Image (spheres, rainbow, N blue to C red):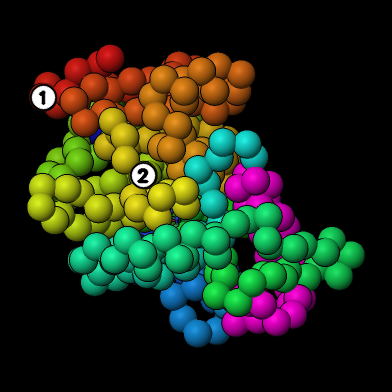
Amino acid sequence: MPTDEQVYAYSTVMMGSPILLKLFEHNQALAAAVFGLIKRQEDRLTVNRQQSEVMSINHAAGLHPVAVSPPVFNLIQCAKAVSVAPGSCFNFAIGPLVKRWKIGFQGNSVPPVDELHSLLPLTDPQQVVLDEQQHTVWLKKAGMEIDLGAIAKGYIADLVRDALRREGIERALINLGGNVQTLGMPESEGEPGWAIGLKQPFAEADALIGVIHVCGKSVVTSGIYERYFWLDGRCYHHILDAKTGYPLDNELLSVTIISDNSIDGDIYTTLLYGMGVEKGLAYLAALPQIEAIFVTRDRQVICSSQHQFRFTLINHEYRIG
Ligand code: ADP
Ligand code: MG
């Protein structure tokens, strides 16, 4: 995409993901401040180390409530609300299953069914007790674990956007391993907006299905092809179903959400992945601010609507459904 101006890209790896910041000025100090912000949030929210605010809750499962900082409490409150909604497949109490499968962390075998079934009672989000006055979180049963992996990156991407705005930055892009948040847009001779690739599942890293153009919006994709393993012709991926203990299984390869806030994008990718295309489209009909692109196993690309973005198909093995 030809642009008239110089883009400065800063990259690092955090949260097990490549992180990319694009600015229109050379500003190493700002990039360092942004990466510092992301690191501080990761330190609070991670469950992939022994210590973090979330791990202090998990370590006290079955024992006692744990007080956390107000922002972490608010994020957990939000994650719980989404998790307990009727029919939701989003479940922030999914930790015991995530840890058992270890998908994306060298896990490449299917755990015994009895073991998975024994973990299901430990994934009930209603058993996470929140106290708004004390800002405490209590996992009622020993062995329960909160996992914010399906919401944290979106939350952090919005914090980065807000921090950049406070610095007077009007145009920038932050990509947290597939969670993209944008401010403004670049000057461009072609299609206006930031060009964000929609990846071709199970292909080389730079292979695309198409390109999404947005201005000042978030674009989040959750797919079964980022963290997975194949066994006996089946793809076992990292979005798990707390009803069965196994990866969610349906017609979808990926869901992309275009929205103002990346936290919504992160929540809805997971939520809509679980709904599938038909239910997902019906659900979104009442939410004009949230738009989705579904990619199905039979290579259809289905957009719920296109008010906040433009999608251009470039890979003709796929078709618009
Ligand atoms: P990613 O950006 O890593 O693809 P997603 O937003 O798709 O993340 O969320 C997947 C992550 O969320 C998993 O790696 C796991 O930590 C957690 N997770 C898995 N299944 C669920 C679920 N049903 N509900 C909520 N979180 C989940
Ligand atoms: Mg998500």
x and y percentages locating residue 75 in the rendered image: 66, 57
Disc nearest the viewer among 1 and 2: 2
Q: Is residue 126 above or below residue 60?
A: above
* Residue 89 visible, this angle: yes
Mark 1 → mark 2, Cα distance in angstroms: 25 Å
Badge 2 marks a residue whose secondary structure is: loop
Q: Residues in magenta?
A: 56-84
Q: Mark 2 packing: few (<14 Cα in 10 Å), some, or many (20+)? A: many
Q: Name the quadrant of the N terminus.
A: top left
Residue 80 included in the magenta stretch of the image: yes
Residue sitting at x 53%, y 22%: 284
Q: Is residue 87 above or below residue 49?
A: above
Mark 1 vs ligand 1: CB under 8 Å?
no
Residue sitting at x 55%, y 61%: 121
Badge 1 marks a residue whose secondary structure is: loop
Which of the two residues, 310 or 215, is positioned nearer the viewer here? 310
Question: Principal SS element in the magenta part?
Answer: helix
For marks 1 and 2 on the same chain, the one whose residue lies earlier in the sequence: 2
> In this view, which residue lies farthest toward the right?
133
Q: Quadrant of ligand 1?
A: bottom left
Residue 231 included in the magenta stretch of the image: no
Mark 1, residue position = 317
| Circle 2: residue type | Leu
Mark 2 vs ligand 1: CB under 8 Å?
yes
Q: Name the quadrant of the C terminus.
A: top left
Residue 139: image quadrant is bottom right
Which of the two residues, 67 or 38, is positioned nearer the viewer here? 67
Residue sitting at x 38%, y 24%: 277
> In this view, which residue lies farthest toward the bottom?
50
Mark 2, residue position = 248
Residue 21: image quadrant is bottom left
Q: Mark 1 packing: few (<14 Cα in 10 Å), some, or many (20+)? A: few
